[in-house]
Amino acid sequence: RVGFAGLSAAAVAEQIKRKLAASYIYNLARSESVATLKFNIVLEAAATRCTCALEYRPEDKQLKAITLF
């Protein structure tokens, strides 16, 4: 529905990397209990925009997609 059907996982991951490198981060929140950072970025495909919520765990340098809407 948002225009990502034709994109591979690698293409979506590359778009996420570009947004992070350009510091397009919104709603940054830190969770003390589990030592994670949660934030949103906006992805664009086929003239459509959607929000991707991500979680970053600094201790193991893992980035995980939480939602895409």
Image (spheres, helix red, strand yellow):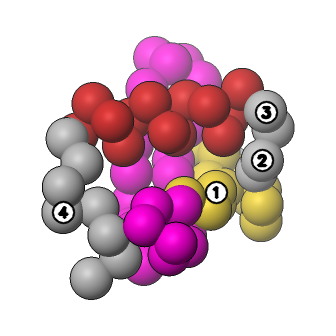
Q: Residues within 10 Å of mark 4 (few under 14, many from 20)?
A: few
The answer to whether residue 6 is above or below residue 11 is below
Residue drawn 42% across and 78% down?
69
Q: Position of residue 60 (x, y in %)?
A: 46, 17
Within-10-Å neighbours for mark 3: few <14, some 14–19, many 20+: few
Of callouts 1 and 2, the N-terminal one:
2
Quarter of the image containing the N terminus? bottom left
As measured in the structure, the alpha-carbon distance from the residue carrying label 3 to the one carrying label 2 is 6 Å
Q: Amino acid at mark 1?
A: Ile
Q: At label 3, which amino acid type do we have? A: Ala
Lower sequence index among marks 1 and 4: 4
Which numbered disc flags the more N-terminal residue, 4 or 3? 4
Residue assigned mark 4: 5
Verify CB contact (< 8 Å) between mark 1 and mark 2.
yes
- The residue positioned 78% from the left and 47% from the top of the image is 24
Mark 4 or 3: in front is 4
> Which residue is denoted by mark 3 in the rendering?
22
Q: Is residue 13 left or right of residue 6?
A: right
Residue at image x 24%, y 48%?
7
Residue assigned mark 2: 24
Residue 36 or 66: which is nearer the viewer?
66
Disc on the earlier residue, 4 or 2: 4
Do callouts 3 and 2 mark residues in contact (Cβ within 8 Å)? yes
Q: Which segment is the magenta one?
A: 44-69
Callout 1: SS: strand
Across and down, in percent, residue 59 comes to: 54, 19
